[in-house]
Image (cartoon, rainbow, N blue to C red):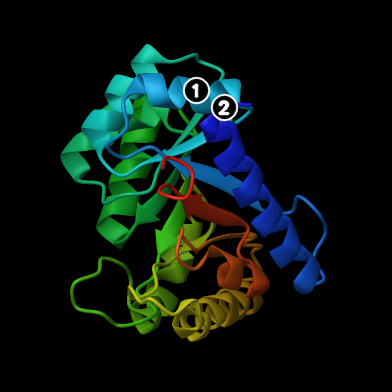
Amino acid sequence: MSAFSDHLETVQDRISRAELRAGRAPQSTQLVAVTKGHPPERVREAIEAGLTVFGENRVQELLAKSAALPSSVSWHLIGHLQSNKIRKVLPVCSLIHSVDSVELAQDVDRIAAELGLFPQILLQVNVSGEPSKFGFKPDSLISNLSTLLELKRASVIGMMTMAPLSENPESARPVFRNLRGFRDRCEAESGTPLPVLSMGMTGDFEVAIEEGATHVRIGSALFV
């Protein structure tokens, strides 16, 4: 067994234990392996270990790695997306986690129509209110939710957030709990299911799973 396989087994075991503690179904959490800063050779090792879903923060790395690796791999963009990069991203990306404004969502929708694509997107919500973070303010998102759900090509399937960095995973729990509650409110008010919650990284993914994360974005615990 390779070193990567050892790390993957440890992470998968931690995910399974968190699901069990939360009373959730086994394998109800999608592991998104974050490949930021790692070359295609390391990603290939991860593919050989059985992973198929990868997340990239930077568009340039996403494009280079998606071109160098098997087409069976699913790529998610988890970092900030600029409008001038949308046209390059959409053909290679199965899910964008980081749509953080109405204007960006509308640009994605318009360019998707030009390319004949039907992308899936998550709305990034700045639950913690940190000035340094991208994302919708909750009140703003409520005001614009109907517009976002009426996009013709881009499908809003859930939300994403990031908790403040901390050495204590428990400090992230209120952030994750608030996103889940906010998502539930948006579902109730709109009548539209928003099943995906992308929240939790290497330092806090177990707490995120306990609070309802469906996708966890893990890099350094895998690519040690």
Q: Nearer the viewer, residue 181 or 186?
A: 181
What residue do we see at 24% from left, 69% from top? 133
What residue do we see at 21% from left, 35% from top? 85
Q: Nearer the viewer, residue 3 or 84?
A: 3
Asked if residue 45 is positioned above or below residue 90 in the image, the reply reads above
Q: Amino acid at mark 1?
A: Glu
Mark 1 closeness class: few <14, some 14–19, many ≥20 residues within 10 Å? some
Mark 2 closeness class: few <14, some 14–19, many ≥20 residues within 10 Å? few
Q: Quadrant of residue 183?
A: bottom right
The image shows residue 43 at horizontal and vertical percentages of 43, 26
Q: Quadrant of the C terminus?
A: top left
In the rendered structure, the answer to whether residue 9 lies left or right of residue 100 reads right
In the rendered structure, the answer to whether residue 173 lies left or right of residue 27 reads left
The image shows residue 53 at horizontal and vertical percentages of 54, 35
**Residue 45's disc number:** 1
Q: Which residue is mark 2?
A: 2
- C-alpha span from label 2 to label 1: 9 Å
In the rendered structure, the answer to whether residue 159 lies left or right of residue 166 reads right
Asked if residue 123 is positioned above or below residue 86 in the image, the reply reads below
Report whether residue 17 is seen: yes
Q: Quadrant of the N terminus?
A: top right
Q: Exactly how many numbered labels are in the figure? A: 2
The image shows residue 110 at horizontal and vertical percentages of 33, 39
